[in-house]
Image (cartoon, rainbow, N blue to C red):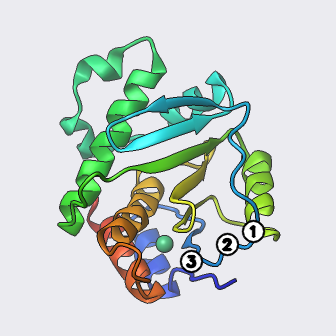
Amino acid sequence: MRLLSLKLRSYARVLLRGVILSCVLVLPDQASGELPDYSGYRVMDTAFTRIFFPENNALLRFNRNLKLGRVDQLINWGALKSTDPSHAVAAKVDALFRRVEDILDMRPEGMRTTLMIASDRQEFRRIYRKMYRSETELIAFFSPARNVIVIDATEVTANVLAHEMAHAVIHAYYGNASTPGKVHEILAQYVDLHLHD
Ligand SMILES: [Zn+2]
């Protein structure tokens, strides 16, 4: 299994902008482990995603940590103020997705991806271990083979999630043709850098 990492130079640039991305990677199609196990998870659908989350607290944590900054302007304020966190999460996730598609200028038809929210570090690592049969220091990843973004709710930021969404959009846009890993990373980093322009 090959892992592609952000280049140090990009790290420095991102850090200079005051955003800490401890680690975001794309895992190419050679996923050798098992499918993510969604049993016992709750599920909700948004325009672009099917979101699985283990319990309401995980969704609350995800919602609290996902601050979109200027991208918030694209969201219906009623959804953000709703007492049901799933409304805010759906609105933010879809707004972020649209923003990512706009930055990339890629709008694959019927774009859908799965977003699996892990409650915490421990659960995130357990999911990763099951899928890839190895340990990880990541906080989020996209599996092209499974069309799923997995993210740790305690570490989610708009930039980290947008980066992974970019991988999902790029993968869908180019279809099943294997996009070179470097192209994937460069384009996903471009989304990171311009998210709040
Ligand atoms: Zn990446």
Counting residues from the N terminus, which is met first, the one under dot 1 or under dot 2?
2
> Depth check: 49 or 156 in front?
49
Identify the residue shown where x is 77% and y is 46%.
Answer: 123
Label 2: which secondary element:
loop
> Depth check: 44 or 73 in front?
44
Residue that carries the numbered disc 2 in the rendered image: 31
Residue that carries the numbered disc 1 in the rendered image: 132
- Quarter where residue 107 is shown: bottom left
Q: Which mark is residue 28?
A: 3
Q: Quarter holding the C terminus? A: bottom left
Q: Quick check: marks 1 and 2 in contact, CB under 8 Å?
A: yes
Q: CA distance from mark 1 to mark 3?
A: 11 Å
Q: Evaluate whether residue 83 shows in this view.
A: yes
> Depth check: 42 or 192 in front?
42
Above or below for 151 versus 50:
below
Label 1: which secondary element:
helix
Q: CA distance from mark 3 to mark 2?
A: 7 Å
Above or below for 179 versus 35:
below
Identify the residue shown where x is 72% and y is 46%.
Answer: 37
Above or below for 177 versus 58:
below
Label 3: which secondary element:
loop
> Depth check: 115 or 19 in front?
115
Amino acid carrying mark 2 in the image: Ala
Q: Evaluate whether residue 196 shows in this view.
A: no
Where is residue 135 shown, x and y percent of the image?
A: 81, 68
- Quarter where residue 177 is shown: bottom left
